[in-house]
Amino acid sequence: MDAAIDATAGQFELNEDQLAIREMAGSFAAEKVAPFALEWDKAKHFPEDVIRETGQLGFGGLYVKEDVGGSALSRLDAVLVFEQLAHACPGFSSFISIHNMASSMIDRFGNEEQRQRLLPKLTSMEWLASYCLTEPGSGSDAAALKTKAVRSGGNGSDFVVNGTKQFISGAGDSDVYVAMVRTGADGPKGISTLVIPKDAPGLSFGANEHKMGWHMQSTRQVIFDDCKVPAENLLSNEGAGFGIAMAGLDGGRLNIAACSVGGAQSALDKALAYTAERKAFGQTIDRFQALQFRLADMETELQAARLFLYAAASKLDRKAHDASKWSAMAKRFVTDAGFDIANDALQLLGGYGYLHDYGIEKLVRDLRVHQILEGTNEIMRVIIARHLIGK
């Protein structure tokens, strides 16, 4: 049976390198992201220049090997980066997370030629990457995807792809699309992974979706209409795509949980500052016990979520046999807690919390989608239950 945290008590005391990573990410976020986050949200502006700047800090390949320009960090190191970026803007941090998920899949499952050809431009952020799994008719049931790729050309030198991907972050802005496609029979064993460049013939994009949150990044359909892709862009082997997609999601779930922790910390910080200044009945409202209890609960939930996240990241770093279960548990618990904390912070600010200029309502909108993407929290419960009682 699992211990609550089967590691030494000092495991989550950050070392000097981790503190330096956290400080570097926090400084960048405070200078380059936080002052503009509300403006980007209001204008629905994709800050491509600032996103590409993160490549200079090594954020384009956080856990990609160093020989192709990656930073080769641990998963625990990486969640520190996403947490700090999300303190400034969860939408910004989540895009960096998605890019890293795509680049790490190429690093882990690509052959040496693919790694050397593709990853240096991805780790430097010269190229931006998107992850393409969901379709209009297949979300939680990812193995039911219909986008089809068939061999063509001399000796099968190309794939011709037809189908549509839905809810793709960065679609139209990214330069590379790591797409799960059907090359065989129905079910997970018929799925493969192709790396598709933006300029591939037959690739187009739908209109930018009108969303509740994450306004600073685009969300569009990715449309393949007899899209021609060189067979040399197939990751691993035909039929390996579903396993590749699921392996990418373990880390992606931790990343999005880290974005929830960062956003929730920002919301709590704003609530503390507001309640220390706002006066009612002759005193600042942080003197009222009812509000103190609310703040205490928010802090407790936040720290529990953070420790859970760090424990799950450590599991993934150690390739523990139950790392997938812990990734699912952390994603479910942390994203639920993050949204609740931000929502409580909005309530503490009253009418001001509902105004855009105070930044709380943006955090509530941005964090809500974390309970849906990278596998809904209902699907996380399915994964957890299967580990508990057998598949």
Image (tube, grey):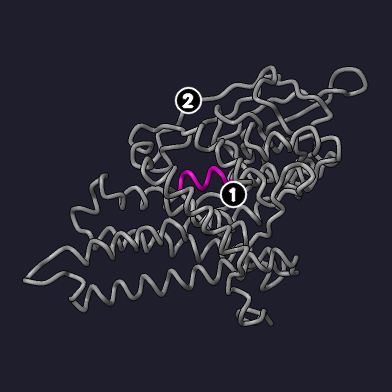
**Are circles 2 and 1 on residues that touch, CB within 8 Å?**
no
Q: Quadrant of the N terminus?
A: bottom right
Magenta range: 90-97
User: Predominant secondary structure in magenta?
Assistant: helix
Q: Secondary structure at mark 1?
A: loop
Q: Earlier in the sequence, mark 2 or mark 1?
A: 1
Q: Nearer the viewer, residue 243 or 391?
A: 243
Which amino acid, mark 2?
Ala
Q: Can you say which quadrant of the picture contains the C terminus?
A: bottom right
Kindly identify which residue carries mark 1: 140
In the image, residue 367 sits, relative to residue 119, either above or below, namely below
Determine which of the numbered discs, if any, sits on residue 159 in the image.
Answer: none
Residue at image point 61% right, 52% down: 252
Location of residue 4 (image quadrant): bottom right
How many other residues sit within 10 Å of disc 2, few (<14), some (14-19) or many (≥20)? few
**151 left or right, relative to 327:** right
Q: Secondary structure at mark 2?
A: loop
Q: Is residue 37 magenta?
A: no
Whole-percent x and y of residue 284?
15, 69
Q: Residue at x 47, y 52 (%)?
A: 27
Tell me where residue 285 appears, x and y as whole percent: 17, 70
Say the numbered circle drawn on residue 207.
2
Kind of residue at badge 1 = Ser
- Residue farthest to the left, as pictured: 282
**Disc 1 packing (10 Å; few <14; some 14–19; many ≥20):** some
Mark in front: 2 vs 1: 2
